[in-house]
Each structure stands twice: as C-alpha cells, then as structure tokens.
Image: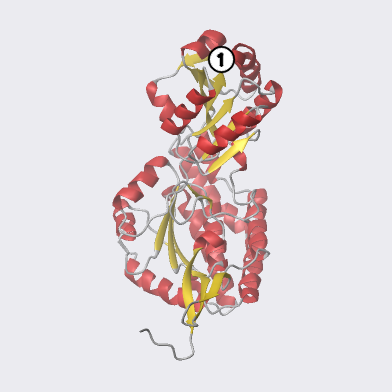
Amino acid sequence: MTVDLVKMGQAAKKASYELGQLSTDEKNQALLKMAEALQDKAAEIMEANALDLDQAKKADLKASFVDRLVLDEGRIEGMAAGLRQIAGLEDPIGQVDRAWVNYAGLEISQRRVPLGVIGIIYEARPNVTVDATGLCFKAGNAVMLRGGKEALRTNIKLVEILRSVLTKLGINPDAVQILTETSHELANEFMALTGYLDVLIPRGSARLIKAVVANAKVPVIETGAGNCHIYVDATADLEMAAAIVYNAKVQRPSVCNATEKLLVHQDVAAEFLPLLAAKLAQASVELRGDEQACQILGSSCKAATAADWDTEYNDYILAIKVVSSLDQAIDHINAHNTKHSEAIITNDYNNSQAFLDRIDAAAVYVNASTRFTDGGEFGFGAEIGISTQKLHARGPMGLRELTSTKYVIRGTGQVRK
C-alpha cells in the first residue's frame, strides 16, 4: 500500500486544530470559493467522471447504481449550490446550549465545539465528497474520505479542486484528504485509526454499514440503509396515496429514502392496488406481493418471499402486503424496518397519532412521501448522512450533528470543600 494513513491522520489532526481558529466569515468565503471552483472546473470533473462511468458499464453494474455515479453540469451545479447553502447557514461553533451559576458561584456554560477529525466511508455517489467536505469544514472538522472504487477518479479530481481553493486562501489543505486506494486492507486499517479519527460515518448499502460497525475500532455513527414503508390506511384518500407512493418509489429509487414496501388496509386494497399498479406500470416497477395482494393484482404481481420484507432494493421494485389493521401494519414495520423513514396515508387523526407515536424510525410522516428525509429538504443544507441510530444524532445530519460540546467554567478563586 502506498497510502500512509498515520501520516494522513497526523496531518488531519493538525488541520483540525487550525480550522478551529477560523472565523465564520473565513469559512464561508472558502465555501463560496469552492463552489465557484467546481463550476469553473466542471469540464475536468466530467472528464474524470466519464472514465469512472466507462469502467462501471464494463463491469455491467445495474442502471440504478450507475445513476449514482453520474455527474453532469446540473449535478455539479447542485453540489456548488449545496456549498453556497452551507455558507449561508448559521455556524454552530461557539454556540452556548445552556449556561448557569452553581452554588459556589461558578459560571458554567456548555458550548458547541467541532468533533475534530471525521472519517467518511461511502459508495458510488461522488456528491458525498463535496457535501461531506462542506459540512465538516463549516463545523470546524477535518475530513478523511474513503469513497468506492467505482468513483475513484471523480472523487480524486473533486478533492484536488477543493484542496487547491484552501491552499490559495492560506488554509491548511489537509482539512480535506482522500484515500487514493480502495483495497479492503486499507479500509480495515482506516477503521482502526483510533489515534487520529474521532468518529467514522459510513454511507452506502446495508452491507457496507454492517461491515463498518462490525470491524471499526473508531466510534461509528450508523447511517443510510433504508427499508422504508408506506402504510395506506382504510380512511386514506386513494388518489393522494397513489401519487405519494409513486413519488416515493419512482422519483429516485436508488436512494435510501425511497420507499421499498407498501402496506395496504384490507378494506381498500381491492380498489387501491389496481389503481396504483396502473400508475407504477408507467415506470415499469416490478410488484411483489403477499397472497392477498397477488390475488387482487393477478399476473402483474409476483409472489414475495420472506427475504423481500427485509430487502432494500434500491431499484424499481416494490413489495406489497395487505394488512387487517393499523396495529398489524405498525408491528410489521417495526419488525422489518431499518429505522429510517416510514409514512402513513390517512384521514383519521387518531390513527396518524398512533403511527407517529409507535413507529420506531428517525423520520415518521403523515400524508407525505418518504423522499423528503434529506438535509436539504429539512433546511440543513447538504447532509453528511441520515443517522438511523439513537445516540448522538438521529435523522438527517447537518452542521449541529457534526459538533460536540465542552463545558467552560469561570471562577473567582473558588475551591471545593
């Protein structure tokens, strides 16, 4: 291996201390310059991306995976816009969460500080390179990136551009570094870089996330895997339900907030499922159903297996289950979901409240698409990921979730008795 992770870690740690001294204005100006540079260098980025896409097609990767790799002018403009949005967000560093004076007259405050050095392991999407850099930088953190081999050339080019901006501004470019090798051996070494990484965030498939959680010695924030459900209640507006399910499945099926499973109350299944199937047929969505769903839909529905209920497809596939009650729907979702995003379509207030209260997930919706679980849609700017765990952060992770706290105590000579 030609990558020296210890040397990279030392450089990142040094850069993180320097970043902590930058003013909000200095960080914002750097982000704006990064955005400008991405657009100025769009042709170079797309040239590198074309090489990655060519390799992906030769490897016969599925279309939904290839879609994640693509960077065109529109997506590059989107990444630049994300950086500008981050520049416009409130800086969490130095914010006081709470403050008080204790019995001894000590002035105690709890303040927001950077996490330090953040490692990101991710697959396919090169936009993560820019989103992660922008968010980590604004929150005062250095970042070490390990993307997938499928986007290696694109990621290296993006980091080269971002680092050049920092260098020109007199900011330590080691605030953002990328691993230029993608071997499993190096990934395992990266996950054990305890002396330098303060936290590790995996973004990608359930397989990747499980591997990181199982092997990492660095603290991990779990993100990403999305076996998301929509439950269509007996009182639902069926036209609205069909529009929401179509959006949640079809708009971008390769992402983690796309809906993979549909539960339908038996009282409306016979009317709703043919309506939905006709709509989904426009996008060639494959339907897999339980016995009741298949009876209603006939040849347009394949029999679902036990494995289907736990599978994140990231593709034009939807599994359907007919349920007899709200309780059955909630029990099924809590048994099979990945704690990401779940939705109910209903006109019954009590049922919506029961769903909101009892579903165990980072984001729970009433009468809306699961596709809204996103840092940008929530107003956080770009996101570092969507946390599906309960410690430190849950849901879309924006700037605040990339900070920790420390206590600042001011005294006048007090000693403890």
Residue at point 47%, 45% (across, down):
224
- Helix, strand or loop at label 1? It is helix
Q: Residues within 10 Å of mark 1 (few under 14, many from 20)?
A: some
Residue at point 48%, 15% (across, down):
302
Place of residue 98 in the rendered image (x, y in percent of width and height, measured from the top left): 55, 69
Residue 57 shown left or right of residue 234 in the figure? left
Q: Kindly tell me whether residue 175 is visible in this rendering.
A: yes
* Nearest to the observer: residue 36 or residue 288: 288
Place of residue 262 in the rendered image (x, y in percent of width and height, measured from the top left): 54, 25
* Nearest to the observer: residue 151 or residue 125: 125
Residue bearing the label numbered 1:
266
The N terminus, quarter of image = bottom left
Q: Kindly tell me whether residue 158 is visible in this rendering.
A: no
Place of residue 356 in the rendered image (x, y in percent of width and height, measured from the top left): 56, 37
The C terminus, quarter of image = bottom left
Locate residue 135: give its quadrant.
bottom right
Residue at point 70%, 26% (across, down):
240
Q: In this view, does 381 lie above or below 354?
A: below
Residue 6 shown left or right of residue 392 in the figure? left
Give the amino acid at mark 1. Answer: Gln
Place of residue 137 in the rendered image (x, y in percent of width and height, measured from the top left): 54, 67
Residue at point 37%, 54% (across, down):
182
